[in-house]
Image (cartoon, rainbow, N blue to C red):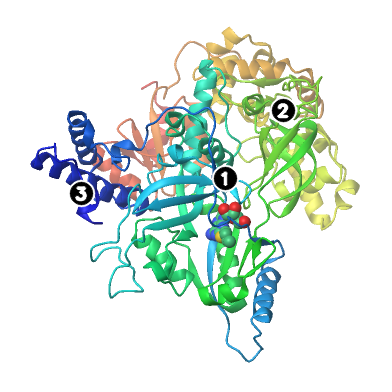
Amino acid sequence: MTTDLFGQLPASIPVADAKRIADLRAQLQLHAHAYYVQDQPLIPDASYDAMFRELQALETKYPEAITADSPTQRVGGKALSQFASVRHRVPMLSIRTETDTEATGAQNFDTRVRKELGLTDSDPPVAYVAELKFDGLAMNLRYEHGALVQAATRGDGETGEDVTQNIRTIHQIPLKIAAPTSGAGSSSLRSSSPVPVPPVLEVRGEVYMRRDDFEALNERQREKIARGVKGEKTFVNPRNAAAGAVRQLDPAIAAQRPLSFFVYGLGEITPAEQGGPQFETHYELLQTLKSWGFPVADQVERAQGATELIAYHQRMGAIRDSLPFDIDGVVYKVDSLALQRQLGFVTREPRWAVAHKYPAQEQLTTVLGIDVQVGRTGKLTPVAKLAPVFVGGVTVTNATLHNEDEARRKDVRVGDTVIVRRAGDVIPEVVSVMTEKRIPGTQVFTMPRQCPICGSAAVREEGEADYRCTGGLFCAAQRKEAILHFAHRRAVEVDGLGDKLVEQLVDAQVIRTLPDLYKLGFTALASLDRMAEKSANNLLEALEKSKQTTLPRFVFGLGIRHVGEATAKELARHFGKLDAIMDASEEQLLAVNDVGPIVAKSIRTFFDQAHNREVVEQLRACGLNWPESEPAAAAPLPLSGKTFVITGTLPTLSRDQAKDLLEAAGAKVAGSVSQKTDYLVAGAEAGSKLLKAQSLGVAVVDEAGMLALLASPAL
Ligand code: IVH
């Protein structure tokens, strides 16, 4: 960019200051271009800010030096009462849209172009330019002698609105342009010399909002709404937010809505006969616009014939969701401007360009109902049932509302008209409600306090977003998960009862609840698909064997939320008997090691569900039993407060057995060695844990040493 761009300053200003002003303006423009257009800042933000403030100070000192194109003048001017009309000197046309699948859309266009040009199959492919179709608003920017004088919306194509004040706030749009002096940024196609900027130049392109800017804007809007600021709302999508910003009558507000811009064509330009530039191709035109400082999307590509257009459509479709901005399709244009002229227009659409759309990612539909689904682990999820709508390439009938807070925030109600979005493989979502279309009498959605599947209490714990069903043992939605957990090796071990089998047993309705497991007969089992006689017998045997269990295993097996193996052991040790646990108050539960308020409450709620107690009784009736004992004496266990780690292969005990022994003696068994480890039990082929223990000076014992510790009186 030239340094004499901002050269003409009044003679009243001392030469040195005038030079500094011009120099600062050129520097600031250069750095803004590097930052906003090229995405490659050359200097730290602080240096830019310092220069900006220096220029502001000089302009305060010499108000006569202020020009509209000064970088300090992007936000200025008063709020308007309405926008002035602008008659476009060259009409702003729209383009024909192809919505067909990728192959036919591009093929149809190419076939039409070739036919119009009188080409036959033996002629070479037509040269095209393929571009992204940005989802924003079309804008005409008029420059006279290099200065931005007017920005206008498309309007009806003939007459638009003058939104210059707002468009000036877009940092990617140069307020002043000139041909590059040399080197960097010059037109690559006319490498000989830079193309001079003509006296009249209208560039056309799309004003849009980046997705990250949109999210941040909506976040700020939500904060304002939460603070009770009147008249604020969130925006439905980036396009909507961009349109709102462009049509904002107060430029100060527009400046707070970060917009971006891509250029894709021309409006009026000084004709070649009057010294204007002569371009041969659309591609060359774009490169020149780029050299003048306008942002051109990186994805602009030249393509030969329909095949390469199809490939472009596919490639861009695949990266669509990872772009930083929304696109709704791609645009194909005949590259040669001579051929464009030859092809001309039909009614108001050029024959040389076409928009090839992707399936829309957002659609309007109505909410038929709000269901609450219960997941395998008891999580309740509100789901909007929708009138079927084709969006993002599939027919959508359900959209998740995630949880109570999300449903409240969006205030989705049965009967509402909503915007549904499905992008890529992401699950469909309700973006927002069209509140203006809300019918009278709709009800605010509330989460049920009862599980819709089993009727047990549904609770939301403090600090959690989700409601959960507390009928873990009884609830049909959680059946499979509950049975698998119960049968787990570390719970009431039922050897051979894995997820495939549970799936099969539950789906075939052979078992409905946990106790049904123990009522299984040989005939029912053997009738299952792929169940051999031997496996049926093995399972019955494993079930029989599992009846003789321990209290900690049984309590852990119940699958009470927050009650893991260690807590189950503490509960069993503390209370000694199952009935004592089931009847313990929250305060009594709090007296147990490792049990805090959340765990205590969870245990209490679990046993408050009549259904859960019934299941426990039925299991006992089926013959499940365990030794019970008196409540734990106050005397500490021999290894209380000691932390062990087990590594390597022990000569006689499995690691699980060693763990059980240690825990029964009050020790904690951890997974990794740290400063807090008291003993490492090392077997054969102990590796890094042994080295770590040695380096930390942790006592190392073998199996015999461990058994000796267990036999010794309290440590
Ligand atoms: S060319 C005469 N190129 O799509 C051709 N338009 O009807 C003028 N759009 O609202 C349009 N990206 O604002 C062109 N790369 C692109 C575009 C593009 C988005 C918009 C344009 C207009 C609509 C076309």
Q: Where is residue 126 in the image (x, y as percent from the top left)?
A: 57, 80
User: Which residue is identified by label 1?
Assistant: 160
Query: How far apart in space, not on screen, are marks 3 and 2 (Cα)?
Result: 53 Å
Query: How far apart in space, not on screen, are marks 3 and 1 (Cα)?
Result: 33 Å
Q: Is residue 629 visible?
A: no
Q: Is residue 278 above or below residue 584?
A: below
Q: Where is residue 656 in the image (x, y as percent from the top left)?
A: 52, 40
Q: Do the residues labelled 1 and 2 touch (CB within 8 Å)?
A: no
Residue sitting at 58 percent across and 16 percent down? Answer: 600
Residue sitting at 79 percent across and 27 percent down? Answer: 452
Amino acid tagged 3: Gly
What secondary structure is found at the residue carrying circle 1? Answer: strand
Q: Where is residue 119 in the image (x, y as percent from the top left)?
A: 64, 86
Q: Are marks 3 and 1 in contact (CB under 8 Å)?
A: no
Residue 7, disc = 3
Amino acid tagged 2: Glu
Residue closest to the eye, 223 or 245: 245
